Amino acid sequence: MNRRTALIFYVLSVYVVVQFVWWGYHLIELTSQINDSSDLVSKRVVMIIGEGAIFLLLLLIGIWQIRRSIKKELALSKRQKNFLLSVTHELKTPLAANKLYIQTVTKRNLNQKQTNELLTKAIDENSRLEQMIDNILNASRLENKVLDPTKEDVDFNLLSNQIKKRFGALSSGAEIKLEIDKDLRLFADQQMISSILSNLVENALKYARNDHPIVIYGHSAPNNAATFGVKDLGPGIPKELKQDVFKKFYRLENEETRSQKGTGLGLYIVSQLVEIQGGTIRCIDNEPNGVNFEIQMNHAE
């Protein structure tokens, strides 16, 4: 729904309410002019006014609910527009970079070291592109509820080390540390856990300062559960926006986040993948600063 439609709805809503009040006023005025003051007339007037008041109340509740829906639709429409702009840029950037690297290799007489460096950069850009496309596909599958977990025994230490190695090669200086209990295992979908950690680490790398580490952690918890997640020492997230970051296409509206690459799908995908596996996620403050995305999920059975 666009803003013009919303404006028309609000104008019509105000008109209907004003008309109800106006009719009620005229009904009361007309009744006061009737000479016959019998009980029958009085009862009918009270009945009409009572029914009209109830109808008006229901109408106001309906208008309020529709107004909430309109605001949500407008906000979603804005996020979708931002997503389309972002994803267009995000897709073009690695493609253009890869084209440049390949053209340089094929058209110039480079030594083996220079060729390997350019090919490594091309592979890194391709990995970025692949991760982005996977996120878009996963978001679509989650939206259509066609993504089901295949649970198995997951070695959390091994998986976290693989994530650390992959992003360590792609990051530009930020250290990735592991704080994980020995032999920690999960009963979960391994591909989904890998996607969860990848998106959380990628998110932290965007906003964490290069001179502070990013931590992947995992600990055993009571009642056959495990607590794991990713925390950083970046600028953090305001308290009132901690739930909004899990919305589809949502990005924080400030210059620091707007200057970073992204589509607003990563944390949405994380929250949905956690939910369909029976886990819970929350965004909390890290100490002394930054953000901590904490997940609770069952141990391996």
Image (cartoon, rainbow, N blue to C red):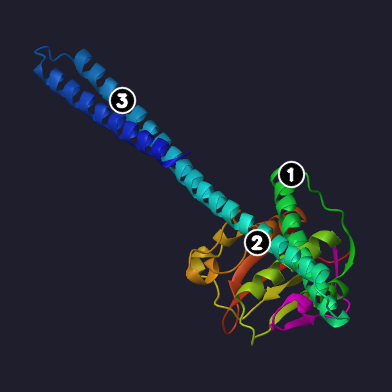
Residues marked 3 and 2 touching at CB (< 8 Å): no
Q: Residue furthest bottom?
A: 211
Which residue corresponds to the image point at 60% horizontal and 75% vertical from the top-left? 207
Q: Marks 1 and 2, Cα distance to the nearest angstrom?
A: 17 Å
Q: Which mark is residue 267?
A: 2
Q: Is residue 81 above or below residue 232?
A: above
Give amino acid for label 1.
Answer: Lys
Which quadrant of the structure image shows residue 249?
bottom right
**Which quadrant would residue 124 be assigned to in this image?**
bottom right
What's the amino acid at mark 3?
Answer: Gly
Spatial distance from mark 3 to mark 2, Cα to Cα? 48 Å
Q: Is residue 128 visible?
A: no
Q: Position of residue 274 (x, y in %)?
A: 73, 59
* Residue 143 shows in the view: yes
- Between the residue at mark 1 and the residue at mark 3, the CA separation in whole angstroms equals 44 Å
Question: Which region is colored magenta?
Answer: 168-187
Q: Is residue 221 located in the magenta-colored stretch of the structure?
A: no
Identity of the amino acid at label 2?
A: Leu
Q: Is residue 179 left or right of residue 84?
A: right
Q: Is residue 138 above or below residue 168?
A: above
Could you tell me residue 255's position as x and y percent? 48, 69
Q: Which residue is mark 1?
A: 145
